[in-house]
Image: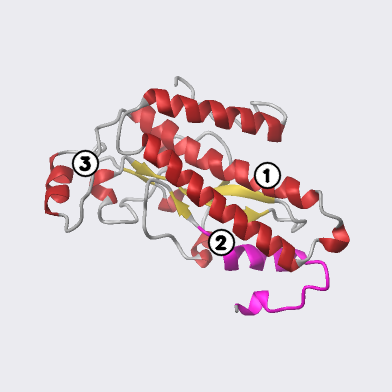
Amino acid sequence: MDGALAMSTDRQPTATDVACLALACALAISACASRRSPQPIDWMAGELVPYRLVSKEDFLAKASNSAWGNFAHGAEICVHILPTDDGGGAFRALMKRECSFWNKVMGPVGFFGRIAALFSPVPVPVPVKQPDWYILQHEQVHFAIMQVAALTLTRQLEQVAASRRTRQLIRSAYSLTLLHVRDRHREFDLDTSGTFRPDDLEKWVRVLEIQMRELCGSEDNCPVRQSGY
């Protein structure tokens, strides 16, 4: 067991405890099926962007987190669920621009992607070319999925009496949240990634808009729909 998690659970967690807990359990989601994620220490080194609408300029990585991504992914957004700075048991989704990738060369997939799929040792679907607006909205939904999960986790922990809000309870709730978002990202990608299905994408946008409005109080505080979409 990680040293940060091996402490007694008969006391309430401090701000440092919560931060260490999140980093020990954290799952960095590089959306669109990226297989490698930055280590937690890398997340603390650069700029972290709280939830907002993203733009192409936010994707600063020069290459994908996976070899296949350089050929097949239109973009990859790096998003993490971390505790707020006050350590009061609240969580939020943060984007790391340095590892978020926009495929400017292949735009998003071309001849070389089809060749790579042809010679792949395992069956690989060849992605369909997607317009930029579709790619950007797709990545925004990935970000929104994480923010909804973070806000939901925060609300659930707020409903627990302070005397019962132990490290073990927070750890369990956090781990369950990560499992949930992993499944939700997978479901979303099955519907909309590597293809061009604007109707399916719109369904996800509407669902996330409803959830954000319920958690944030207004659409302006937690927008999901990209301007012009």
Q: How many marks?
A: 3
Query: What mark, if any, has residue 66 been given in the picture?
Result: none
Q: Is residue 221 visible?
A: no
Mark 3 or mark 1: which comes first in sequence? 3
Q: Position of residue 92 (x, y in %)?
A: 64, 48
Left or right: where 159 falls relative to 218 = right
Residue in the image at 64% along x and 58% along y: 174
Look at the picture and state if 133 lies above or below 19: above
Query: What mark, if any, has residue 26 been given in the picture?
Result: 2
- Range of residues picked out in magenta: 2-27
**Do the CB atoms of the residues marked 1 and 2 lie less than 8 Å apart?**
no
Q: Position of residue 88 (x, y in %)?
A: 77, 56
Which type of secondary structure does the marked residue at label 3 adopt? loop
Which type of secondary structure does the marked residue at label 1 adopt? helix
Cα–Cα span, label 2 and label 3 = 31 Å
Left or right: where 159 falls relative to 191 = right
Q: Which residue is mark 3?
A: 126
Q: Which residue is mark 1?
A: 152
- Seen as rendered, the residue at the extreme top is 228
Q: Nearer the viewer, residue 166 or 133?
A: 166
Q: Position of residue 103 (x, y in %)?
A: 29, 42
Q: Residues within 10 Å of mark 3 (few under 14, many from 20)?
A: some
Left or right: where 194 falls relative to 12 = left
Mark 1 or mark 2: which comes first in sequence? 2
Q: Is residue 155 visible?
A: yes
